[in-house]
Amino acid sequence: MKKACSILLCLVLVFSFSGSVCAEGTDDSLMWSEPGLKYIAAALAPQKEIHDEKEAEAYADSLWPLLSDDPLPDGNREMAVDHHDNSYHYGIYTTDGIALYNVGFLSNGVIMHIGCRVNDPRRYADDARKDPSELDPKVWEQAKVKITEWVEKVSPGVLALLQPMDVYSVIDVGDRQYLFIAAMPLDAEYDGCLSLIAIVEADGSVRMMDYSLYGAG
């Protein structure tokens, strides 16, 4: 029960950041960081030095292949800067404001969150949700190898700071499964956790839909 509660708290953490700040009206520029909190991303080794928004946009575009082999989506590009932790938050949106791709990273290139839109209306279908205990262990073990490799590529060294990854929910739509995964920090002083949504296709291939070191993709 304690583990489940921890995961739940982890998942809502990022939403509480923006909600509490807006409610108090103390700083409407606050986006992803909150002064005084300790984040896992800050403990990771620098990846690339980024000096301005132009460099940040180029870096963001270069990260798209981590999610898909398809061309970078067309759409309205938006960039925002969180001056509290010197991070950049970039997105490509449809004219209706739907995010096709979003990514956030520190000025040293460390990725904080990354995700893309998957055109599958079943991806959050509650009637297809099942308990993680029903997930075929072989499917998870095979997928975990690929997921681990991907996480280490995106955030080198992060898994050494975390407890083992755990599947806390599964949406099985027949031809694919959406695995909702979390890993809590080994050091309880860290705020947030690793949160990931992985797509496992019927042929065993794996791709990522959402990833975050804040606790929500």
Image: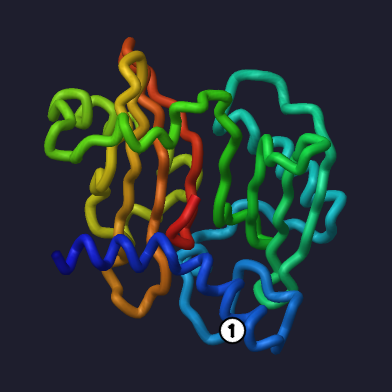
Taking the spot 84% from the left edge, 39% from the top edge, the residue there is: 76
Residue of label 1: 35
Locate residue 107, reporting x and y percent.
69, 62
**Tag 1 secondary structure:** loop
Residue extending farthest top: 203
Locate residue 81, reporting x and y percent.
77, 64
Locate residue 8, reporting x and y percent.
32, 62
Res 135 → quadrant? top left
Taking the spot 36% from the left edge, 20% from the top edge, the residue there is: 176
In the image shown, does 157 or 203 lie closer to the viewer?
203
Locate residue 112, reporting x and y percent.
56, 56
Q: Is residue 36 above or below residue 81?
A: below
Residue extending farthest front: 127
Taking the spot 80% from the left edge, 53% from the top edge, the residue there is: 79
* Viewport quadrant of the N terminus: bottom left
- 10 Å neighbourhood of mark 1: few (<14), some, or many (≥20)? few
Res 10 → quadrant? bottom left
Taking the spot 70% from the left edge, 56% from the top edge, the residue there is: 89
The image's colour scheme reads rainbow
> In the image, what residue type sits under mark 1?
Pro
Q: Is residue 18 above or below residue 208?
A: below
Query: Is residue 13 found left or right of 168 in the rendered image?
Result: right
